[in-house]
Image: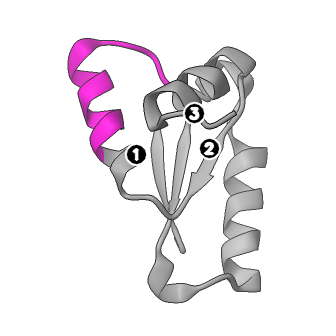
Amino acid sequence: MTLTDPELLDRLTAQGRILVTYDADFLALAGERLAQQVDFSTIIRVSAAFGVTSEIVDDIQLIAESIAADEAQNRVFYVPL
């Protein structure tokens, strides 16, 4: 089953999960949802220019461990930090 970006974000939001992505389309989607006052799951946007490094993995882990469940909506983080 293939989900569209909005469907994926809806599913992750319903499950209380964080989205980690290279896809910049999710930034526009987050902006739309903020403007419409529609909640969405936290998005961690990884810069493709850096590839996957231990620093990026550490940054993702730091973000995931630092935000409480009730704070894990309507936020966008960029890594590397």
From this viewpoint, which residue is outermost toward the left? 35
Look at mark 2 in the image and give the residue it sits on.
19
Q: Circle 1 is placed at which residue position?
A: 26
Q: Where does label 3 land, which residue?
A: 3
Question: Are the residues at dot 1 and dot 3 in contact (C-beta closer than 8 Å)?
Answer: no
Above or below residue 50? Residue 59 is above
Label 1, residues with CA under 10 Å away: few <14, some 14-19, many ≥20: some
Q: Where does the image place residue 38, in percent across and percent down from the top left?
A: 37, 13
Disc number lying in front (1 or 3): 3
| Amino acid, disc 2 | Leu
Quarter of the image where the N terminus is located? top right
> Above or below — where is 38 with respect to 56?
above
Looking at this view, is 65 or 19 the one in front? 19
Residue 19: image location, x then y, percent: 62, 44
Instruction: Look at label 1 and name its amino acid.
Output: Phe
- The alpha-carbon separation of the residues under discs 2 and 3 comes to 14 Å
User: Relative to the observer, which residue lies in front, 72 or 35?
Assistant: 35
Task: Count the numbered circles shown.
Answer: 3
Q: Secondary structure at mark 1?
A: helix
Q: Which residues are magenta?
A: 28-40
Tell me the residue at 65%/28% (across/down). Answer: 12
The residue under the point 55% across, 36% down is 42
Q: Is residue 47 above or below residue 50?
A: above
Identify the element where label 3 is drawn. loop
| Mark positioned earlier in the residue sequence (2 or 3) | 3
Which tag, 1 or 3, sits closer to the chain's start?
3
Q: Earlier in the sequence, mark 2 or mark 1?
A: 2
